[in-house]
Image (cartoon, grey):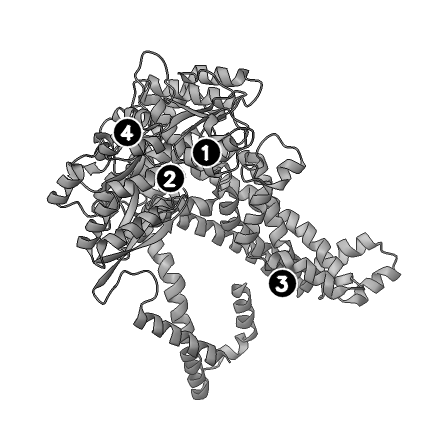
Amino acid sequence: MIVRIAASLSLMIAACVVVGCGGSSSSSGGRVTLNWWAYNEPSGSFTKAAKRCNQQAGGRYVIKFNALGKDADTQRQQLVRRLAAKDSSIDLMSMDVVWTAEFAEAKWILPWPKALAAKVKRGTLSGPYRTATYQGRLWAAPANSNTQLLWYRKDLVKNPPKTWDALIDTASKMKKGGRIEIQGASYEGLTVWFNALIASAGGKILDGPSTPAFDRSSATAARIIRKLARSKAADPSLSTQQEDQNRIAFESGSAAFQVNYPFIYPSAAMDKLTGFKQKDIGWAPYPKVDEEHPLLAPVGGFNWGVGAYTKHPKEAFAAAMCLRDAGSQRLFATLGGLPPTLAALYSDKKFVKSYPFAALIRKQLDSGGVRPQTPAYADVSLAIDTVLSPPGSLSPKDAVSRLTKTVKDALDSKALL
Amino acid sequence: MSAVTAERTASDSAPAKKRPLSERAKAERKLGWMLCAPAVIVMLAVTAYPIGYSVFLSLQRADLRFPGRNAFIGLDNYVSVLSSSRWWQDVLHTVLITVVSVSFELVIGMLLALVMHRALVGRGLVRTSALIPYGIVTVVAAFAWRLAFSKAEGGFVPSVLHLSYDPLGKTWTTYLVAILAEIWKTTPFMALLLLAGLALVPDELHEAAKVDGATAWQRFWRITIPLMKPAILVALLFRTLDAFRIFDSVFIITGSTHVRSVETLSILGYNELLNRLNLGLGSAVSVLLFIMVAFIAFLFVKGFGTSMASQRGEG
């Protein structure tokens, strides 16, 4: 019995070796299969774009979509483990805008050839384009950008507040739906919030790639986060909430405000809303810290990178170009609510009709608060969200010194995070 | 444990050792070694090599993201780990989870074992139903606990108890859920080991004590427990070692919520190694965890040895 099992097992393994099990890229009969690792965009616009590009390629290549995890931290882990092991089955990948420096420095992605880089630059918004460059070279193609807006219920709120303090005070005083949905879990989302706050208070996280630059603005940011977390407007689950949980809580009708990315708008059309309709959702600029400083809203999004160990770089670059052209970006925006990186789309009438907040998003992207570009970004971000979490017990008094120390140790790879 | 058996066989065969080995004995010993060799080689390849490699990495500055900066840095990683407050926090979390869950498991496991031992009707049913939690895959069980308790994910517990907060958003309630899940999952294992120990206690002793007028509690405390001591120690050893290295259930229960206030040492090592790709710091954490586990095992084996010796009347 055991012998038989062992024999059939070894047969299976042998068959795998011959036929090629698993996801390694292969070219059978001249057709190249490109493995595209991207996050599983909930509306399915990524797989639709892949299908469209496969048709356009006319048999030159076939893009095979492989889903990565739900949040940015998991996606990075999955990619990085494979890349560190020089996995040749990653031909194309979706990269969060903050990974560019790390992936480029570790030589996990290929720099874009000059001719193609020039093509990418043409017509791309400058903010998103900058997120894909590192040390003067283009390392990825900006596919979609993202920024957060203040979403509110028009049936409950007449004039959306302009600053954080006004927002928290307004929500706390409301009799019905007086909650603000925002990302408070200890993960990248908390760093995004914090970065936008200190940028809008005139500060920054790093000075150059490796010097912490926390100043009074960090204390201001910490004060706002703490104030919201301890106010009546805070969701009871604040310290565990990420973007999607915010969306669900907002759709359940318990909150009048939500600070989130535009994906919540198309999904509100598909989901069941309690007590309101999609047309009741209004949008306003991301809140400011005060009246003196200009608003620097968060800038997110994804770029397409070509894996350094791919066996088909030429086809991979071609596929990446197709997956970020106007047709693909239109799909991402209308189905998934993801803001385009191509300037032309923002003046396309048909597009603006299906994406009514396009002008506001474009304005925020032009002057967005980009997160620091450093190869150790993952460590820096982890250090920050560790200090800030849980938001309710944050102490603004020693926030500056704790942040400076933790981030410095993280950059020197001295501390456990 | 293996040390004890080795010691025993050594003392049993001590008189035979004095005589020089005959040709036949020599050949037999050689054959024995050859028969063992494949197993020894496999053990070396799958345990000794990774452990040695971890120790080697823990003395290096090794980060997969910055291969150019790799260098030998001696004990610097250990200094960084031991001077970091996160390490000591996680030691505290791990010790707390281990001590609380193992002590509850021992008490409940003993009760379960007594029930299984004494059950007159439906013995098979009692034993099977008691063992079900142990048969469930840990990750699945952990997900069940998480989905029951998480308010953000629509669990039924917060709505049944009318909780205004998210149990998986607060430190102490997350602890409670993690420890409950651990107890629920592994008490059957404890009970099984203790049941084997109970079977060792001869009924005659109980009957004799009964005749002498000992109460049920006295019989349990003075007869059952002392005779079961080796079984209890083995059960405690296995469970303490497992609980100290706890990873999967805590990882799943806190996974979606990123509550790091209950992070254990295994999760810390995992984060440093697989999240930050800092092989040096991560290996230092793993090696320190290995040393702590080895120390616990040593203490138990010591205790086990003396109890065995005292049972044989050598103590």
The residue pinned by badge 3 equals B309
Q: How many residues crowd around disc 3 within 10 Å: few (fewer than 14), some, or many (20 or more)?
A: few
Q: Residue at horizontal 54%, vertical 77%?
A: B15
Badge 3 and badge 1 both on one subunit: no
Q: How many residues crowd around disc 1 within 10 Å: few (fewer than 14), some, or many (20 or more)?
A: many
Q: Residue at horizontal 52%, vertical 26%?
A: A255
Mark closer to the observer (2, 3):
2
Dot 3: chain letter: B
The residue pinned by badge 1 equals A185
Is the Cβ of the residue at disc 1 closer than 8 Å to that at disc 2? no
Badge 1 and badge 2 both on one subunit: yes
- Identify the element where label 1 is drawn: loop
Where is B117 relative to B15, above or below? above
- How far separated are the C-alphas under marks 1 and 2? 23 Å
Dot 4: chain letter: A
- Identify the element where label 3 is drawn: helix
Residue A336 is marked as 2
Residue A370 is marked as 4
Rendering quarter of residue A143: top left
Mark 1 or mark 4: whose residue is earlier in sequence: 1
